[in-house]
Amino acid sequence: MTESRLGAILTQRFDRLVWTTLAAYAVLVVLAFALVSEIGLRRSLEQSADGIESLLGLYVEPGAAPTTVAPAMLADQLLGMGDRFMITRTVSTGDAVGGPSVYFLSPTMPAKRIETGAEIGSTPDDVRRTLLQSIAERGRWRFHVLHRRAGEFDIYVAGSRGPYLFALLGLSLGALVLLPVAALAARRGANRTVARALTPLGRVVAETQDIGPRDLSRRVGVPTGLAEVTGLADAINMMIDRVESSHQALEAFTADASHELRTPLTHLRAQVQWALAEGRSAEEIAEALAATGREVDRMSRMVEDLLLIARGENRQLAIERQPFDLAQVVREVEEITADMAAGEDITVRAELDGPLQAIGDPARTRQILLNLAANAVRYTKRGSITFTFAREAQMAGVHVTDTGEGIAPELCTRIFDRFYRVESSRSRAHGGGGLGLTIAQLLAKLQDGRIDVTSEPGQGSTFSLWLPAAELEGR
């Protein structure tokens, strides 16, 4: 399926918008011009009517006998006059027609009575309607007629729409001609604007394509000049961060596994070759097989620990988040620690002051504390291991304090690295694989917690596990 380019879509939509906007603007301009012209014409007629009305006081009744005239003739005369106005007068007469009569007044001829062809008794209003209708039929839309009553006089002023209709026609033709030109100019401007707007996006795409699997340290440059594109670049950089972390975790797992498995595999090969040599007794072969089994068990635990670390670093490890009593978990760990220290000159005790609610995974918390306790037992020849509670702002903590060998302060941050061992006293002779503290710190972070350590050589160490306090869950 062929997809459209963003630049083409934006340009097309901008073209439609420009055409619609320009066309609507042209129509509005034409309508506004027509409205203003019509208002101007009406004001001009009003001014003419005002002038005519002011002169009616000078009217003198002509002495000649009145004659009759038809409304159609009056309409032709009105629309053909140079000044385009006409005056009628309604008077009361005693002739046979009866009632008021309407006369057409002209400064150049005697007054003429207006005949409508209606029945006797027609009112002056009937005459006015007939006259206005006749004027409208002849003037149509080309003229605007203003009618004003001034006592017994009726003033009719006609104004031609021709001048402004001609200008309106020219304006309309100009709009029709200039509209495509303006739209074409707007299209060219839109193309340049869209191209400039999409330049940062194209640069982000190019920089993203240049980042290969062996160059994950590179990032897309920000800021880009556009907030939306900068947001996209930041999202891409965060995604690359996650990919790089996963890639580094995979490389670290591969390197650590190959490094740590090399020695036991060599040992296994030596044990098997020694057992297969001629002249070995059954007891010697059994001893070699037992040593091989122990090494296989150790390798299996190491691989399981490495897989757990890899899953945790990739956020694929199931971690619960629920309130639980930290004191209950500590008591369980205390009992197991006492069993681990059986036969040693070590006192294990828990100094607890009631329950302590925390948020996290009880099983994973138990695993963390067991790792810390196992380390304490492993590196404490005599003395004590103590579990105590602590509270810190929004965190609930457990201190695991021993009187063992201690660690130099400058090494306290490195002991959480994979397979890191402090001096020869923390070698394989102690039975550790070098992953316990790494797993403990990882499980703590996955529960939004942490592990702190304070230690001094020869004075012992204190490992502190901090988890979110349960009181915060309801906030």
Image (cartoon, rainbow, N blue to C red):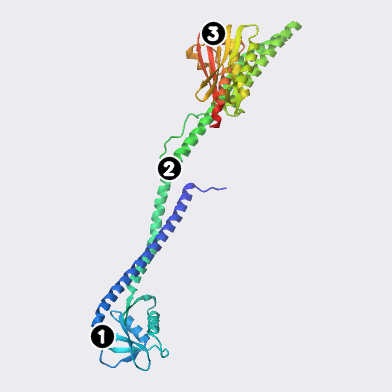
Q: Quadrant of residue 365?
A: top right
- Residue visible at 45% across and 51% down? 11
- Measure how far apart labels 3 and 2 are at the Cα level: 62 Å
The picture places residue 403, in percent across and down from the top left corner, at 55, 9
- Measure how far apart labels 2 and 1 are at the Cα level: 80 Å
Q: Nearer the viewer, residue 37 or 403?
A: 403
Report the residue that reaches farthest toward the left: 58
333 up-or-down from 52: above or below: above
The picture places residue 287, in percent across and down from the top left corner, at 72, 8
Q: Residues within 10 Å of mark 2 (few under 14, many from 20)?
A: some
Determine whether label 3 and label 2 are within 8 Å by CB.
no
Image side of residue 274 versus residue 194, left or right: right
Which of the marked residues, 3 or 2, is nearer the chain's N terminus?
A: 2
The picture places residue 309, in percent across and down from the top left corner, at 59, 23
Name the residue that disc number 2 marks: 199
Please name which of the two marks, 2 or 1, marks the residue nearer to the observer. 1
Q: Residue 288: tell me if it is visible.
A: yes
Name the residue that disc number 3 marks: 405
Q: Nearer the viewer, residue 116 or 123?
A: 123
Q: Quadrant of residue 250?
A: top right
Q: Nearer the viewer, residue 466 or 280?
A: 466
